Image (cartoon, coloured by chain):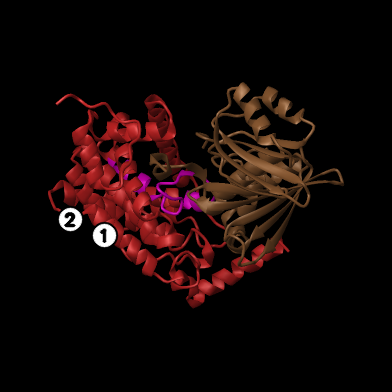
C-alpha cells in the first residue's frame, strides 16, 4: 500500500476517528496529529501553531506566580487571600499528604483566585475552570523537571481530547453545569499528565474517561453569580481528581465505559439538569440563606454603580 | 472550533462570556464605528445586566472600545484610562426576554448630532458576534473581514460590487443582501478572507448610489 498524503481537512468526532487517522495517514504520533489538525483548521503554518502554544504555556506559568504573589481579594468578600494564607500555613499546620500535594492545591487556588480578581489566565477550557491544568499538570511538570517541549506536546494532546468534549457536548456551565467546566478541565488535565510519561492513546483515554466520569452531575451554582465560590475550591477537586485518574491509568486501570460514551452521558445529564443549577444562581449553594445574603449585598453595591 | 479554544484563549478573568466576550463586543463595535468618539451609551441586557458588574463586564466593554484586547492587563483599569482619554460612558440596564442573555447595545456619540448604533452578543468561550450595525441586522464574529454597504436599490449593484472586489483580488467568503422596497434602499454584508484594500473601498464609495461603506478588519489569531 502506498503512503497516503495527510488530507486537507481533518474532522474528528470520536476516539475512533483519531485512531483511524493515526493508522491511515503518516502522522508522526499523537502530538503531530493535533498540531496538523489545528494548523489545517486555522489555516496557520505548523510552526505558528507550535509557537502559539509556547506563548500559552508561558502565560499559564505566569498566572501561577502572579496568583501566589499577593493576597487576592474580591469586592464580594468571597475571596479573601485564601491561597496566600494557605502558602504560609506550613509547617505550623499539619501537612496531610506532603509538600507536592500542597503545591497542587496552592497553584490551583492561585490561578483560580487570579481569574476572579481580573488577572490574566489561560481559559483551559474555560475561565471558571482555569486553575485545574496549571495546578495539577504544571506542578507535576515541575516535580519531574519535564522539558518544555514535552510539556507543549502533552498540551496539544489534551487540547485534542477537549475538542471531542466541545464537539460532542459542551464546555459551558450554562449549558451542562460545572461537570462541563471543572469536569472537562479535570479530564483534559488527566490526559495531559499521562501523556507526559506515556504517549499511549489507550491510557490517555482511560485517564480522561475516569476523570470526567468522577465529576458527572457536578452542578453550577455560583453564589451571587460570581466565579468565586464554590468555583475556586472546585478547581482543586478537578486538580486532585486529574492526578488520581492519571495515576490509575498509568498503572493500567481501565475505564469500563469508553471516553466518548462518558462525554455522551455528561451531555445527557447536563440536559436533564434543571436550569436552576446551570449558572443561573437560582439553586444550590447560591440560594442558601448565606448565599442569598451575599447576593443581596453584591447587588446593592452594584446598583449604586449603575442606575 | 479547535485546540486553542480548549487550551485558551489567554484572557483577563473572571468569565469567558461576561468578561472576554464582552470585551470583544466593545472591540469590534469600535472597529465598526471606525472613527474617534467622545461618548458612548452602553445598554446591558439580562444576564449582562444582572451579574455583569461582578464579572467586570462594564470595564471589559469600555476596554474593548478603547482598543484593549481580551488579554490586556489594563482591562481592570479601563474606567481610569477612559477618563484620561476623555471618553465618557453611560450604562443602562434592560431585562427583556426577547433579547439574548448576554447582549449589549452600544451607541457612539461624536459632537451633538452624530450617533451610531452597534449591537452585539457574547456566545461563550470568549467569542462574540455583532448582530446589528445602525439599522442593519448582520452577524459576524471577527473571523472574517467584513464590508457593510448601504446603497440605492438599483439593478446591477451587486454586480458592480462584485466587479470592484474581483478587480482588487478580494475573495468573498459569504454574502448577505436585503432591501427595503418602500424606501428603495438596500444593504449588503460581505465576509472576506482578507481586509478590503482602501483603493477598492474608495472605488465603491465613488459610486453615486452607494451611501455608506463600512469596512471592518478581521480579528483572527489575535488573543
Mark 2, Cα crowd under 10 Å, few <14 / some 14-19 / many 20+, is: many
Where, quadrant-wise, is the N terminus of chain A in this rendering?
A: top left
Which of the chains bears the disc numbered 2? A
Q: Which chain gets the brown colouring? A: B
Asked if the residue at tag 2 contacts the one at tag 1, i.e. Cβ–Cβ closer than 8 Å, the answer is: yes
Residue in view at x 43 percent, y 59 percent = A173
Q: Which chain gets the red colouring? A: A
Residue behind mark 1: A213
Start-end of magenta stretch: A113-140
Which secondary structure, mark 2?
loop
> Does residue A138 show up magenta in the picture?
yes
Residue at the extreme bottom of the image, as rendered: A289
Residue in view at x 76 percent, y 43 percent = B87
A175 or A153: nearer the eye?
A175
- Relative to residue A64, is residue B170 depicted above or below? above
* One can see residue A179 in this view: yes
* One can see residue A97 in this view: no
Q: Position of residue A182 (x, y in %)?
A: 37, 56
Mark 1, Cα crowd under 10 Å, few <14 / some 14-19 / many 20+, is: many
B146 or A268: nearer the eye?
B146
> Does residue A128 show up magenta in the picture?
yes
Residue behind mark 2: A255
Amino acid at each position: 500500500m502506498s503512503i497516503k498524503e495527510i488530507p486537507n481537512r481533518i474532522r474528528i468526532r470520536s476516539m475512533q476517528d483519531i485512531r483511524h487517522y493515526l493508522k491511515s495517514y503518516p502522522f508522526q504520533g499523537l502530538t503531530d496529529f493535533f498540531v496538523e489538525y489545528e494548523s489545517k483548521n486555522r489555516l496557520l503554518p505548523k510552526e505558528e501553531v507550535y509557537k502559539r502554544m509556547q506563548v500559552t504555556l508561558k502565560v499559564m506559568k505566569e498566572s501561577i506566580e502572579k496568583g501566589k504573589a499577593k493576597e487576592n481579594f474580591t469586592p464580594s468578600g468571597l475571596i479573601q487571600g485564601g491561597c496566600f494564607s494557605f502558602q504560609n500555613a506550613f509547617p505550623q499546620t499539619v501537612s496531610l499528604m506532603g509538600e507536592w500535594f500542597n503545591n497542587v492545591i496552592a497553584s490551583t487556588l492561585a490561578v483560580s483566585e487570579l481569574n476572579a480578581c481580573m488577572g490574566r489566565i489561560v481559559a483551559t477550557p474555560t475561565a471558571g475552570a482555569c486553575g485545574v491544568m496549571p495546578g495539577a499538570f504544571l506542578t507535576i511538570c515541575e516535580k519531574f523537571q519535564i522539558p518544555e517541549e514535552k510539556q507543549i506536546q502533552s498540551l496539544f494532546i489534551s487540547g485534542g481530547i477537549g475538542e471531542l468534549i466541545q464537539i460532542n457536548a459542551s464546555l459551558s456551565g450554562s449549558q451542562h453545569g460545572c461537570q462541563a467546566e471543572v469536569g472537562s478541565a479535570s479530564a483534559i488535565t488527566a490526559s495531559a499528565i499521562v501523556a507526559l510519561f506515556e504517549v499511549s492513546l489507550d491510557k490517555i483515554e482511560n485517564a480522561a474517561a475516569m476523570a470526567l466520569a468522577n465529576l458527572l452531575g457536578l452542578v453550577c451554582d455560583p453564589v451571587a453569580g460570581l466565579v468565586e465560590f464554590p468555583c475556586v475550591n472546585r478547581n482543586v477537586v478537578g486538580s486532585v481528581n486529574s492526578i488520581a485518574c492519571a495515576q490509575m491509568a498509568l498503572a493500567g486501570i481501565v475505564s469500563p465505559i469508553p471516553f466518548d460514551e462518558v462525554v455522551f452521558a455528561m451531555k445527557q445529564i447536563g440536559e436533564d439538569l434543571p436550569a436552576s443549577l446551570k449558572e443561573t444562581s437560582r439553586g444550590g449553594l447560591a440560594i442558601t440563606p448565606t448565599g442569598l445574603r451575599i447576593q443581596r449585598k453584591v447587588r446593592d453595591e452594584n446598583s449604586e454603580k449603575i442606575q | 472550533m479547535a485546540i486553542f479554544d480548549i487550551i485558551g484563549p489567554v484572557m483577563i478573568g473572571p468569565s469567558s462570556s461576561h468578561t472576554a466576550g464582552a470585551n470583544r463586543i466593545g472591540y469590534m463595535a469600535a472597529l465598526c464605528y471606525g472613527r474617534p468618539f467622545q461618548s458612548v451609551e452602553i445598554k446591558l441586557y439580562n444576564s449582562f445586566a444582572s451579574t455583569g458588574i461582578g464579572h467586570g463586564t462594564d470595564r471589559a466593554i469600555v476596554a474593548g472600545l478603547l482598543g484593549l484586547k481580551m488579554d490586556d492587563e489594563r482591562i481592570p483599569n479601563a474606567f481610569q484610562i477612559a477618563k484620561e482619554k476623555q471618553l465618557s460612558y453611560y450604562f443602562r440596564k434592560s431585562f427583556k426576554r426577547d433579547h439574548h442573555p448576554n447582549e449589549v447595545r452600544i451607541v457612539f456619540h461624536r459632537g451633538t448630532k452624530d450617533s451610531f448604533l452597534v449591537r452585539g452578543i457574547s456566545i461563550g468561550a470568549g467569542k462574540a458576534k455583532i448582530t446589528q450595525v445602525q439599522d442593519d441586522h448582520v452577524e459576524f464574529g471577527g473571523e472574517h473581514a467584513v464590508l457593510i454597504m448601504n446603497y440605492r436599490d438599483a439593478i446591477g449593484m451587486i454586480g458592480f460590487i462584485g466587479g470592484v472586489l474581483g478587480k482588487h483580488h478580494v475573495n468573498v467568503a459569504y454574502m448577505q443582501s436585503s432591501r427595503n422596497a418602500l424606501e428603495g434602499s438596500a444593504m449588503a454584508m460581505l465576509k472576506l478572507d482578507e481586509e478590503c484594500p482602501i483603493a477598492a473601498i474608495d472605488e465603491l464609495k465613488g459610486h453615486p448610489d452607494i451611501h455608506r461603506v463600512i469596512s471592518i478588519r478581521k480579528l483572527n489569531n489575535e488573543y
